[in-house]
Amino acid sequence: DEDVALLGRSEDDLDALVDEGPLPVLAVIGRPNVGKSTLVNRILGRREAVVEDVPGVTRDRVTYEADWAGRRFVLVDTGGWERDAKGLHLRVAEQAEIAIELADAVLFVVDATVGATDTDEAVVKVLRRSGKPVVLAANKVDDARTEADAAMLWSLGLGEPHPVSALHGRGSGDMLDAALAVLPPISQVGGGYAPGGPRRVALVGRPNVGKSSLLNKAVGSERVVVDEVAGTTRDPVDEMVELAGRTWRFVDTAGIRRRVHQTRGADFYASLRTQTALEKAEVAVVLMDAGTPITEQDVRVVQQVIDAGRALVIAYNKWDTVDEERRYYLEREIEQDLVQVPWAPRVNISARTGRHLDRLVPALDQALESWDTRVSTGRLNSFMGELVAAHPHPLRGGKQPRVLFATQAATRPPRFVVFASGFLEAGYRRFIERRLRETFGFTGTPIEVSVRVRE
Ligand code: GDP
Ligand code: GDP
């Protein structure tokens, strides 16, 4: 059990683990039906492949943490991309372009039983231009007889084709070894981060909430340093922004500035952008359009931040458009739709007029401080002792599950492990979480409480 395994390590070890930097990113790209999703599932070790037969369906999660041979990396799955688009040829190349921009290396999947198609050739052109390392997976080589099909793919000029059967697992180890050999130890797509450098902020939110306006306002009023790290991407991906006398790294701003004009599939890209920006960030500012009702997509973005374990600030933008009546409804919507994040600092801003932009930095500071917080085991257990004495767990079948001990297993975000003599009900776990927040703050950070039952 991973959390328990962590407990055997010293605090320094834990901190080293936490601070090792952003994981390298491997993007899996290729035409529809070549087996990308099957391969992603294979790499993640999932037994059942997620099959998405509905065109245009978007997946919430597109990046996954994976590991192979003791190394951890981030896998970007573009397999959820719509399958029946017109002008597919062009779209796949476009998809590749975006995925490449977000990745340290690319796993290019080709169906060996079909061979290289014109679409594959178009993708190869994009890959060449990017200069990113590419590993060529010749998929659907289910047995030795089809190995020759794989060899035909040398013609793509991408080097050795790695024959693999995503379906049966054949060859996937060698292919992953090759992919890991070209992945850098720490992600370079953000330009590379020096430890102790500027804090990394992701500006996220559904389209048209004002992300690029806010960025322009923040950048326009202050000094900007365009990040130029050789050998990364053609365009600067991050921007250094001076706010309140300090430098902040706004990650993946290229993704905000370069709008992908698409009708179908746009949600998928928006989600992919958000996900990859979050991977690189420490704290996220989720922008909402305060002038219009909160949407499902807004809520989904907030959930993505929580799932990614990043610190969170919510900024209600376009405050200049909010009147008395709208304000009333907005407060009701917040109560209803954002009940899961009463702990997120809130700022009401206007990127257009500049209103209250100065309140962003204190909110970011507060969220990051909470995100970094470590509660000593001593303090945590005296807190637990008092809590349990005053509010014991309800009896279950005549027995009383007891909390034995608790410790904070990680920071960024804070993760707690509670050891108990029996199963703790979900309600009681939420109660512990609520009390942890009341006692220790944690404004602006998700926290996690997991329970281990000791016999
Ligand atoms: P994607 O559109 O690229 O994500 O492709 P999928 O992963 O959805 O796979 C498309 C089809 O190819 C599915 O019917 C898979 O079962 C099949 N497939 C994927 N990998 C293999 C493989 O290694 N061998 C064979 N024979 N079929 C495969
Ligand atoms: P993005 O898609 O999230 O990057 O959103 P944009 O920055 O492109 O903004 C979308 C639209 O909202 C543009 O027409 C902006 O001018 C407008 N907008 C952005 N911020 C504000 C604001 O604070 N007040 C008002 N009234 N409009 C804004």
Image (tube, helix red, strand yellow):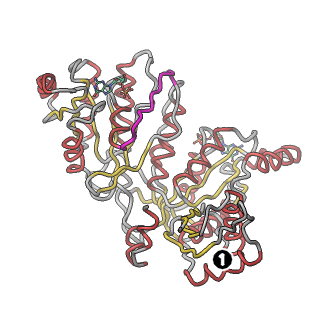
**Splitting the image into four quadrants, where does ligand 2 fall?**
top right
Residue 19 shown in magenta: no
Q: Amino acid at mark 1?
A: Met
Q: Which quadrant would residue 176 be assigned to in this image?
A: top left
Vertical comparison of 33 with 382: above or below: above
Locate residue 243, reporting x and y percent: 56, 65
**Measuring 45% from the left and 67% from the top, which residue is drawn there?**
4
Question: On screen, 123 above or below 221?
Answer: above
Q: Position of residue 105 (x, y in %)?
A: 28, 45
Of 342 and 5, nearer the camera is 5
**In front here: 252 or 36?**
36
> In percent of the image, x 20 and y 37: which residue is there?
171
The dominant secondary structure in magenta is: loop
Location of residue 298 in the rendering, given as x and y in whole percent from the top left corner: 65, 43
Q: Quadrant of the N terminus?
A: bottom left
Q: In the drawing, does residue 108 fall left or right of residue 326? A: left
Name the residue nearer the viewer: 153 or 405. 405
- Tell me: is circle 1 under 8 Å from ligand 2: no
In front of the other: 441 or 94: 441
Give me the residue at 58% from left, 54% from top.
Answer: 306
Task: Tell me, yes or no, whether the highlighted magenta stretch contains residue 51.
Answer: yes
Q: Secondary structure at mark 1?
A: helix
- What crowding class fits label 1: few (fewer than 14 Cα within 10 Å), some (14-19), or many (20 or more)? many
Residue that badge 1 annotates: 384
Count of residue discs: 1
Q: Residue reaching furthest top?
A: 86
- Residue stretch in magenta: 44-56
Find residue 87 and report its horizontal and vertical position in percent: 40, 16
Quarter assignment of residue 451: bottom right
